[in-house]
Image (cartoon, rainbow, N blue to C red):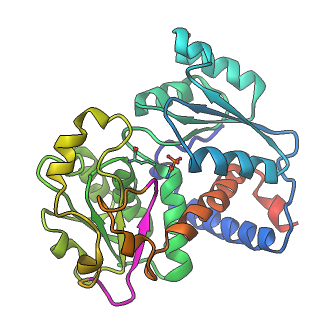
Amino acid sequence: MKKDFISILDITEDELHHILADAIQLKKLRQAGTLPEILKGKSLAMIFEKSSTRTHISFEVGMNELGGHALFLSTRDLQIGRGEEIRDTARVASRYVSAVMIRAYKQSTIEEFARYATIPVINGLSDREHPCQLLADIMTINEHVKDMKRLRVAWIGDGNNVCNSLILSSALTGMDVSIASPKGYAPKRDVLDHAREIGGTIHLSRSPEDAVRDADIIMTDTWVSMGDEDKREERIRAFSGYTVDEHLIRLASPDARVLHCLPAHRGEEISEGVIDGSQSLVWEETENRLHAQKALLLSLLKKREGIYR
Ligand code: CP
Ligand code: NVA
């Protein structure tokens, strides 16, 4: 049976621990100049409906470093752009490549692709989730704090795709998540309900100061996600007061660390002093996309043991 990674909840706690351990091992090997070619002869199709820097580069480099090959495919160039059905594209891709990573506007597009594909399908970001980002974020947190249970994570800003994956990951990691977002921009009720039903601990508030108090980790993301550009002015107004800045991080735990999935907008969701300051982990976080996704690919393609040979 093939396995997909469309939601962060598509992996169990046990699988998460294996992926984290493998990612750390792959990181060490790479730092030592060793790139095990475990995916020789394998190909990853990377289908993008929207722009990307990190997801594109980290998946392509990751496949190459594992001895495999990655294909960058924009929907503007694929026949999908001229109306070919998702299900047919999924069937076709399944005959050529070993796995597919898709960045799409709608989660339902990725789900439809996965229903018809006979190979693993990875969500490279949708309107609902960004599970690959959370793998890297959890890895980054775990490198600094060994025990994630009850760790206090504050999310300041939009209750968006990255926030949803964080919320859902609370049940997997035991992290306690406090979200501060303005009226109308809180995460969706069904995501919160689901996370709580399976054991996640999530607090909601309107106050960034309340959410961040004594936090160990502070996370934020753009106020204007891809697809929201037509509401930019309205959003900038709504999020005023939600900047992760020096004043805000002083309320958190003294050794609190700051994450941002990037791309960042200095002076909007995060101040220059914070993103470029000593409490920022964003550059480690961005590097960890590479290691975490290599580990994910090995897990989905059932090649984990190759790292330890
Ligand atoms: N964080 C992230 O996914 O970045 P890209 O949009 O550049 O891929
Ligand atoms: N929330 C952002 C994340 C980008 C990686 C977006 O969807 O544009």
Q: Is residue 279 above or below residue 94?
A: below
- Magenta span: 252-263
Is residue 300 shown to the viewer in this render? no
Q: Main secondary structure of the magenta part?
A: loop
Q: Is residue 82 above or below residue 247?
A: above
Question: Is 224 contained in the magenta span?
Answer: no
The answer to whether one can see residue 298 in this image is yes
Q: Is residue 204 left or right of residue 244?
A: left
| Quadrant housing the N terminus | top right
Numbered circles on residues, count: 0
Identify the image quadrant of the C terminus: bottom right
Q: In the figure, residue 115 lies in which quadrant?
A: top right
Image coordinates for residue 157, horizontal then vertical, percent: 25, 58
Image position of 173 with respect to 251: above or below: above
Q: Is residue 185 above or below residue 249?
A: above
Q: Quadrant of residue 75?
A: top right
> Does 29 sit left or right of 207 as displayed?
right
Residue 70 position in % (x across, y down): 74, 38
Q: Farthest residue in the bottom direction?
A: 254
Residue beneath the point at 83% across and 59% down: 306
**Residue in front for this viewpoint, 304 or 61:** 61
Residue 107: give x, y in percent of width and height.
Answer: 42, 34
Residue 121 % position (x, y):
60, 36
Comparing 228 with 299, the one in front is 228
Q: Nearer the viewer, residue 239 or 164?
A: 239
Could you tell me which residue is drawn at 25 percent across and 53 percent down? 192
Question: Of all residues shown, which one is farthest toward the top?
Answer: 83
Residue 53 lies left or right of residue 106; in this view the side is right
Residue 93 or 273: which is nearer the viewer? 273
